[in-house]
Image (tube, coloured by chain):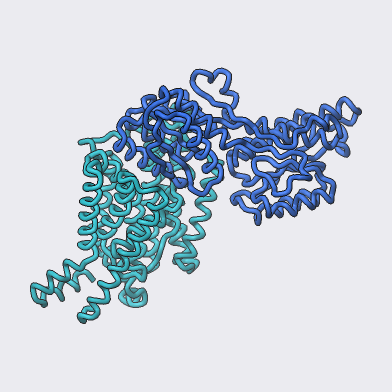
């Protein structure tokens, strides 16, 4: 979700950029000299304080600046729910933004908001998550968690020589993103008959819980070769467990996302790889598509369903992939 | 109250006295713990190893700190829902302080010392707010601490933006995880020391007696000249201080301040106290029971992983454990009342 959100922001930014450039080329009012003609794109994240959304926002802001459009961001500060999100969407529509980038907190509950935007002729791009009826949407841009799980399995398999015991440290049994990553991981592992998945535990928001679980698994399976930690919380706890057991590097650890602390642990050799999303790219694309639609240019090139791929960061490719680290606060 | 019970015991026959001891919640829990250890060890001998014990003790330490404060609070007839979010808040406050000092080139010793002070001060401050809301603004403890629980969790997100706070001195991790005798860490030794103090204070000092008195009958306590409001303020500050220490130690264990690390921990602490026989209506409870309650709920998690119980079933088992432990306690109370010892 966070990743998707970031994608949205990036897309939004990209769209904004395209618009400003187009504006430049088309007429002299471009680049914000004339406020009356500057495009305003609204951005409603799922939860304003979430670092995923923040990273997306940073990407969107950069793209908006590049495009010379105005980015209006409003969202609930602390709660990921349609009840708290809908008022912000309504407010955007009331303000008659020229386009809307939305991270729907619920596919059904946010559908009426998209319909409202349609009657107001405001184009909408959804990012990270989407709504039930996507017919009106300019684009629906999502991150690919199943593919991310597969990439984690492939990378781990390569790193442990395609045989041995591995463990799945998940974050929460109810988080959709976690479920999808687990699914991709376990499906892909079936292609490696010599790899055994010895178990799965949940951190339930508490990294110390992951530390304890991994300690216990290391006791139970002393020959453990690798671990996939599906989110930030489980990753932090697993890192602590491996470091304290003196097994950094010995047990291969694949993490998900690329926050500053995770990349630091990758450099230190505790994570052997990270599956990183590209929130900046996603947000840029969202803005680009919106601006193209509004300006009615390159419309045939706009992809309606975009699944953003992930990038696998390791110490070997860090020179090329470090740019995907999520921006620090 | 404990003294009264013992006096009564003395007048009874030896058999009745033995029965009373055997029916004590903490004695029952000790039995439960022994049965649990035997069961898990039979299922997987790895459970009975120093490594497993060391891991269980590290899990137990923060829960126990929260539960110590919670035991005092619940004995006064109150509840403190904020301790989990205070754990998270003080942990990230310490982590952020240590990170900026560390990046600023401050000496490691000074950095850690300041971080420790920040964590404890944060905990104390939340406790003070709780105490003032309850004694001055006259809010019910449930409401007052529900408010600070939400505010604390929100403040943690504002401070961190929801991300983990790494970048403190690496010595923190060594300090938090170096084991002596392959079992005890420095934080654990401190927890044992703090436990000894809070236990003795509750059982043998005026502060402890007042805690029971306030919870048994606040009106009578006031009449007897106890400064009830002042006492409550101190009890909530104690709970906050324990939460601050717990937040610090969780940070020491992980080497990273996590904004969500306290989530749900208030319930773990309340469960430990209640399983331990502390009554939610106030006036009764023992630290020994809380220690065992916290030990049982943390040991069961490691045990269930070792014997390979699916993670979602673990929560069901713990829920059942709480129901059974509290159920036994109720039967116990009724039996005693039946025997004319109400």
Residue B333 vs residue B331, the one in the foreground: B331
Query: Residue sitting at 45 percent across and 26 percent down?
Result: A157
**Residue B129: where, in percent of width, then height?**
47, 57
Residue B204 in view here:
no
In the rendered structure, the colour chosen for chain A is blue
**Residue B115: where, in percent of width, then height?**
41, 39
The answer to whether B160 appears left or right of B176 in the picture is: right
Q: Quadrant of residue B134 in the image? A: bottom left
Chain letter of the cyan region: B
Q: Quadrant of residue B291 in the image? A: bottom left
The answer to whether B289 appears left or right of A50 in the picture is: left
Residue A208 in view here:
yes
Would you place residue B3 above or below residue A109 in this image?
below
**Residue A276: where, in percent of width, then height?**
56, 30
The answer to whether A259 appears left or right of A240 in the picture is: right
Query: Residue sitting at 27 percent across and 73 percent down?
Result: B331
Considering the image in quadrants, where does the C terminus of chain A appear? top right
């Amino acid at each position: 979700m966070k990743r998707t959100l970031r994608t949205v922001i990036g897309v939004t930014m990209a769209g904004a950029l395209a618009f400003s450039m187009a504006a430049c080329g088309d007429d002299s009012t471009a680049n914000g000299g004339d406020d009356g003609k500057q495009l305003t794109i609204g951005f409603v994240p799922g939860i304003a304080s979430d670092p995923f959304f923040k990273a997306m926002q940073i990407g969107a802001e950069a793209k908006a600046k590049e495009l010379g459009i105005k980015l209006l961001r409003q969202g609930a500060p602390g709660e990921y729910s349609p009840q708290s999100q809908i008022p912000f969407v309504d407010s955007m529509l009331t303000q008659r933004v020229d386009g809307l980038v939305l991270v729907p907190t619920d596919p059904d509950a946010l559908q009426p908001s998209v319909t409202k935007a349609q009657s107001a002729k405001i184009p909408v791009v959804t990012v990270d998550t989407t709504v039930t009826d996507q017919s009106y949407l300019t684009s629906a841009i999502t991150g690919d968690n199943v593919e991310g799980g597969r990439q984690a399995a492939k990378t781990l398999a390569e790193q442990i020589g395609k045989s041995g015991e591995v463990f799945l440290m998940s974050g929460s049994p109810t988080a959709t993103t976690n479920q999808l990553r687990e699914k991709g991981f376990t499906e892909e592992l079936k292609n490696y008959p010599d790899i055994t998945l010895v178990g799965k535990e949940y951190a339930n928001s508490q990294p110390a819980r992951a530390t304890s679980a991994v300690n216990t698994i290391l006791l139970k399976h002393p020959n453990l070769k690798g671990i996939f930690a599906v989110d930030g919380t489980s990753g932090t706890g697993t890192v602590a467990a491996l470091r304290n057991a003196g097994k950094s590097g010995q047990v291969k650890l694949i993490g998900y996302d690329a926050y500053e602390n995770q990349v630091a642990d990758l450099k230190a050799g505790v994570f052997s790889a990270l599956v990183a999303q590209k929130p900046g790219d996603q947000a840029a694309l969202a803005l680009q598509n919106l601006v193209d639609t509004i300006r009615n240019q390159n419309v045939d090139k706009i992809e309606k369903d975009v699944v953003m791929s992930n990038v696998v960061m390791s110490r070997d490719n860090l020179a090329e992939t470090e740019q995907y680290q999520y921006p620090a606060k | 109250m404990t003294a009264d019970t013992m006096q009564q015991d003395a007048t009874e026959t030896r058999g009745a006295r033995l029965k009373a001891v055997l029916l004590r919640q903490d004695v029952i829990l000790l039995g439960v713990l022994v049965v649990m250890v035997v069961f898990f060890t039979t299922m997987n001998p790895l459970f009975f190893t120093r490594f497993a014990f060391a891991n269980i003790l590290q899990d137990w330490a923060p829960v126990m700190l929260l539960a110590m404060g919670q035991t005092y609070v619940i004995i006064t007839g109150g509840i403190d829902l904020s301790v989990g979010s205070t754990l998270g808040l003080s942990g990230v406050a310490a982590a952020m302080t240590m990170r900026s000092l560390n990046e600023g080139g401050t000496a490691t010793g000074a950095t850690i010392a300041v971080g420790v002070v920040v964590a404890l001060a944060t905990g104390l401050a939340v406790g003070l707010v709780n105490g003032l809301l309850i004694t001055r603004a006259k809010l019910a403890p449930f409401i007052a601490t529900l408010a600070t629980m939400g505010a604390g969790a929100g403040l943690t997100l504002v401070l961190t933006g929801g991300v983990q706070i790494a970048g403190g001195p690496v010595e923190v991790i060594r300090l938090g995880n170096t084991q002596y005798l392959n079992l005890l860490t420095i934080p654990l030794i401190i927890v044992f020391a703090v436990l000894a103090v809070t236990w003795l204070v509750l059982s043998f000092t005026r502060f402890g007696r007042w805690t029971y008195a306030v919870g048994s009958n606040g009106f009578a306590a006031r009449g007897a000249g106890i400064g009830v409001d002042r006492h409550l303020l101190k009890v909530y500050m104690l709970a906050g201080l324990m939460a601050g220490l717990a937040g610090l130690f969780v940070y020491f264990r992980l080497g990273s301040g996590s904004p969500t690390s306290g989530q749900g921990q208030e319930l773990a602490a309340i469960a430990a106290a209640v399983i331990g026989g502390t009554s939610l209506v106030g006036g009764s409870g023992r630290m020994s029971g809380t220690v065992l309650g916290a030990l049982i709920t943390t040991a069961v998690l490691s045990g269930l992983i070792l014997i390979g119980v699916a993670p979602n079933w673990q929560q069901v088992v713990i829920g059942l454990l709480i129901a059974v432990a509290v159920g036994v306690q109720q039967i116990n109370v009724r039996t005693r009342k039946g025997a004319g010892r109400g």
